[in-house]
């Protein structure tokens, strides 16, 4: 197989007409890959994504061909996928105010051009989920863009369809997670076109790398929430004397263990399955 791309977390290989998407145990924060890995992280992301793709099959087509027909050395952490031409947008849905969305709201009262009510605080639940796209930067950081920017980039019909699908995926995911005591504050999706022109959900979906997960019984607006996702590592790194440029800091063993425990907890609570690496 031919290595086509090595990203911050995933490696993409060509296998005939298919792609093999392999999730590593690497961790990136602020677009910097840290030198310490979190054991089983790639497997947890892959297995959780496969579970979600099944739950969302009636909402949107996805890129999965097989979660088992992969090389043995990548068993559990690889997916055989359709080749897609990926769209140059990060499709983000938000149901709560956090992260960069909170910072943007505090500056302008809007997020990606969407006006929000006055008086919201960190972790406030929004009146309804909103679509807040960003660029998909190959270098540097993603930037907020408006829905009109998306229309200019990919056309009105595609933008309207994928805005609707993004919000539908979020609503379905948030509903299922709520039944299991987890709040999905926001999530990031990626879409591409298959060879026949079909719009297809790709990459990962509703994982602890691409979403903010909070325990519902601890949710308290006005403060930072207990993160069951990669935000926990970001929060740890923000306590360091580090300028967020390479090389990144080593992750201490206790932070590695706590991070892995959060990923496992989310997997087990959402799927109802016991994690067995």
Image (cartoon, helix red, strand yellow):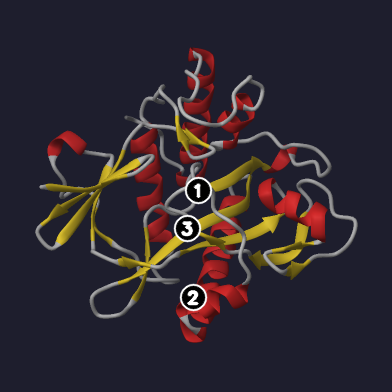
Q: Nearer the viewer, mark 1 or mark 3?
A: 3
x and y, in percent, of residue 149 in the image: 58, 74
Few, some or many residues within 10 Å of mark 2 (<14, 14–19, 20+): some
For the point 30% across and 63% down, which residue is it? 63
Residue 239 sits in quarter: top right
Few, some or many residues within 10 Å of mark 3 (<14, 14–19, 20+): some
How many numbered circles are shown?
3
Instruction: Decide which of tag 1 and tag 3 comes sooner along the chain.
Output: 3
Find numbered disc 1 in the image and state the secondary structure of the residue it sits on.
Answer: loop
Q: CA distance from mark 3 to mark 2?
A: 12 Å
x and y, in percent, of residue 176 in the image: 55, 56
Q: Disc 2 designates what residue? A: 153
Left or right side of 215 for 116: right
For the point 47% across and 54% down, which residue is it? 137
Q: Disc 3 designates what residue? A: 136
Q: CA distance from mark 1 to mark 3?
A: 14 Å
Is mark 2 in CB contact (under 8 Å) with mark 1? no
Q: Is residue 42 above or below residue 257?
A: below
Q: Disc 1 designates what residue? A: 210
x and y, in percent, of residue 39 in the image: 37, 25
Few, some or many residues within 10 Å of mark 1 (<14, 14–19, 20+): some
């Amino acid at each position: 197989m031919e290595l086509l791309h090595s990203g911050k977390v995933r490696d993409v290989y060509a296998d005939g007409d298919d792609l093999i998407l392999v999730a590593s145990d690497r961790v990136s924060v602020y677009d910097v890959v840290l030198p310490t890995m979190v054991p089983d992280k790639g497997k947890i992301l892959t297995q959780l994504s496969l579970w979600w793709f099944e739950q969302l099959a009636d909402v949107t087509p996805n890129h999965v061909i097989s979660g088992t027909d992969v090389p043995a050395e990548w068993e559990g952490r690889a997916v055989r996928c359709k080749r897609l031409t990926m769209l140059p947008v990060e499709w983000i849905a938000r149901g709560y105010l956090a992260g960069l969305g909170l910072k943007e709201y505090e500056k302008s009262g809007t997020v990606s051009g969407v006006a929000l009510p006055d008086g919201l605080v960190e972790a406030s639940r929004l009146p309804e989920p909103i679509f807040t796209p960003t660029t998909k930067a190959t270098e540097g950081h993603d930037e907020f863009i408006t829905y009109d920017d998306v229309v200019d980039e990919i056309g009105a019909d595609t933008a309207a369809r994928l805005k609707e699908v993004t919000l539908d995926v979020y609503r379905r995911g948030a509903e299922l997670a709520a039944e299991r005591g987890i709040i999905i504050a926001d999530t990031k999706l990626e879409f591409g076109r298959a060879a026949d022109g079909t719009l297809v959900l790709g990459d990962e979906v509703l994982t602890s790398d691409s979403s903010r997960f909070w325990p519902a019984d601890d949710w308290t607006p006005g403060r930072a929430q207990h993160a069951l996702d990669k935000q926990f590592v970001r929060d740890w790194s923000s306590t360091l004397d580090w300028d967020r440029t390479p090389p990144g800091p080593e992750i201490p063993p206790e932070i590695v263990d706590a991070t892995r425990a959060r990923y496992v907890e989310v997997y087990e609570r959402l799927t109802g399955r016991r994690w067995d690496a």
